[in-house]
Every structure is written in C-alpha cells, then in structure tokens.
C-alpha cells in the first residue's frame, strides 16, 4: 500500500473524487486505499482532540446516540468497552453477532459501514498497537458507551497538554 505522504496533492484530489464511486470498481487501487486510510486517520485525530478538550459525557457523536447506545447495551450488555478484546469483535463469531447490530443502522447513520479506527484501550491514545479498524457504527457504539460509562474521562486529564 502506498504511504499517505507519497500520494501528493494531485493524488489527494483524484482520490477524494474516487471515494464516492462504488468499491467494486477499484480492486486494490493504492490511491483509494491511501485515501481511506487518510480519512480514517483524520477522523481518529479529530475525535481524540475532542476527547482531550471536552468532558466526554457531553459529547454527542450522532443525532442517534441514544438509540445506538440503547441497542448496543441491549445486544451486548456485558461487553467491556474500557479495554476491547479484539478477538471478541473480529472473530467469525464476533462478526456474526455484530452484523445484525450494524445493519439495523444502515438507513439511519451516515457512512455506518465506513472503516473507522477505534482504540483498544480507552485509557490510551491512538497508536499502531492500540488501534483496530471497525465499521463506523461499531466505533459509535463503543465510543458512546465509553463516554457515557466514564471510560474516556481520564483522557482529557492525561492528554490535555500533549495536544500542543
């Protein structure tokens, strides 16, 4: 895969216009892969800056936060969100459990299936070791739960001064 820094401004513009086209047209196009990676990274960076600046309990990630949280805790009442066990969400069994949850938001949450980075350990920042790729709705479910259940509370204190 091409590194994001190798794409250049022309590649960025080309890739941005390509992202709106059907995925089956691309195969393994490196420019498109780089664009998706950049978009996912930018989303992660913005979200972490928010967590570092604002009380997470006050954050609204979507207009459907209440419905997402209620459905998430109904389907996964005992899922620990402070530290995600990647096997639980990425195993074939985990994916089968998550699929109906995700699909119920198909027409309600924009870009519900868009690849999004989520931190495995809520007490730490995004890093290669602490990050996995999930569908956007899965990110929302986990992060809304983390915000409401206090798992993200120490991020602001821990990383507030690192942003600068």
Image: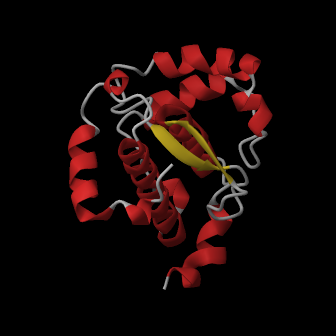
> Residue 148: x percent and y percent?
59, 47
Q: Nearer the viewer, residue 65 or 99?
A: 99
Q: Answer whether residue 78 is visible to the viewer in this image.
A: no
> Residue 125: x percent and y percent?
64, 65
Quadrant of residue 111 within the rendered picture: top left
Judged left or right of residue 59, residue 57 is: right
Residue at 46% x, 16% y: name it: 104
Residue at 66% x, 21% y: name it: 95
> Residue 44: x percent and y percent?
49, 56
Q: From the viewer's perspective, is residue 140 above or below residue 146?
A: above
> Residue 119: x percent and y percent?
64, 52
In the rendered picture of this protein, how many numbered marks are placed on residues? 0
Judged left or right of residue 123, residue 40 is: left
Residue at 67% x, 58% y: name it: 128
Q: Answer whether residue 30 is visible to the viewer in this image.
A: yes
Quadrant of residue 26 within the rendered picture: top left
Residue at 63% x, 67% y: name it: 155
How are the residues colored? secondary structure
Judged left or right of residue 24, residue 117 is: right
Q: From the viewer's perspective, is residue 154 above or below residue 84?
A: below
Q: Nearer the viewer, residue 106 or 147?
A: 106
Q: From the viewer's perspective, is residue 106 above or below residue 151?
A: above
Q: From the viewer's perspective, is residue 1 above or below residue 137?
A: below
């Amino acid at each position: 895969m091409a590194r994001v820094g190798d794409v250049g401004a022309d590649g960025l513009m080309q890739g941005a216009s390509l992202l709106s086209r059907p995925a089956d047209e691309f195969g393994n196009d490196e420019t498109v892969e780089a664009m998706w990676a950049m978009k996912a990274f930018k989303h992660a960076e913005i979200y972490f800056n928010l967590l570092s600046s604002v009380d997470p309990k006050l954050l609204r990630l979507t207009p459907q936060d209440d419905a997402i949280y209620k459905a998430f805790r109904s389907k996964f009442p005992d899922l620990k969100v402070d530290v995600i066990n990647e096997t639980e969400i990425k195993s074939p069994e985990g994916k089968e459990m998550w699929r109906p949850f995700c699909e119920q938001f198909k027409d309600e949450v924009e870009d519900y299936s868009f690849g999004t980075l989520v931190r495995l350990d809520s007490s730490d920042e995004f890093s290669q070791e602490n990050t996995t790729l999930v569908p956007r709705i899965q990110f929302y479910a986990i992060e809304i739960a983390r915000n409401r259940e206090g798992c993200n509370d120490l991020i602001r204190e821990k990383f507030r001064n690192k942003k600068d």
